[in-house]
Amino acid sequence: MGINSEEVNQMNRKEFIQKVGWVFEHSPWVTSAAWENGPFESHDHLLQTMIKIVQNAEEPMKLALLRAHPDLGSRLQMSEVSQKEQAVAGLDQLTMEEFEEFVSLNQQYVQKFNFPFILAVKGQSKESILAAMKQRIHHAYHEEFTIALHEVYKIAGFRLNDIFKS
């Protein structure tokens, strides 16, 4: 099921975006730009290339990337991969009280920062995610924008690892 660097390097742009484009949530522009920078020595080389593309993007593109992510713990429509990632962390089994707390914190966070709270949930629990939300909501905008982008990079790294697994 997994692919390797050689297979990635042989893909045309359309195949590349189809296979890899989802690692940055609803933002295939990252993968499209990365394709132009191939060939890739490894999946880490590909990830670093995509991260550099995001880092060099204009702020509105970065903000759109952040806004493409779903609220954690919400019951809103989200991509299948996001559903699975949140389920592993137990966010699909919140009590009504926990759900309401997540909704409230998400609303406060979005109101303050104008993008959703983003955390790479792999290895996290609903308790650790909630604690991170409560802490990070007090950050300044620039600090939280930077942290959110780094979390997006972690998420993309986890997703890319899944693609390359044999």
Image (tube, rainbow, N blue to C red):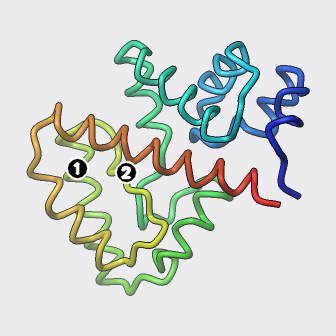
Q: Residue most toward the front?
A: 41
Q: Nearer the viewer, mark 1 or mark 2?
A: 2
The first of marks 1 and 2 along the sequence is 1
Marks 1 and 2: CB-CB under 8 Å?
no
Describe residue 133's horizontal placement relative to residue 118 as left or right.
Answer: left
Q: Secondary structure at mark 1?
A: helix
Residue at the image point whose x is 41% and y is 22% from the top: 55
Which residue matches tag 2? Answer: 118
Q: Mark 1 and mark 2: span between their CA atoms?
A: 10 Å
Q: Amino acid at mark 2?
A: Ile
Instruction: Check the picture and name the quadrant holding the C terminus.
Output: bottom right
Instruction: Check the picture and name the quadrant holding the N terminus.
Output: bottom right
* Total numbered badges shown on the rendered structure: 2
Q: Nearer the viewer, residue 122 or 62?
A: 122
Q: Nearer the viewer, residue 63 or 41?
A: 41
**Which label is found at residue 83?**
none
Q: Amino acid at mark 1?
A: Tyr
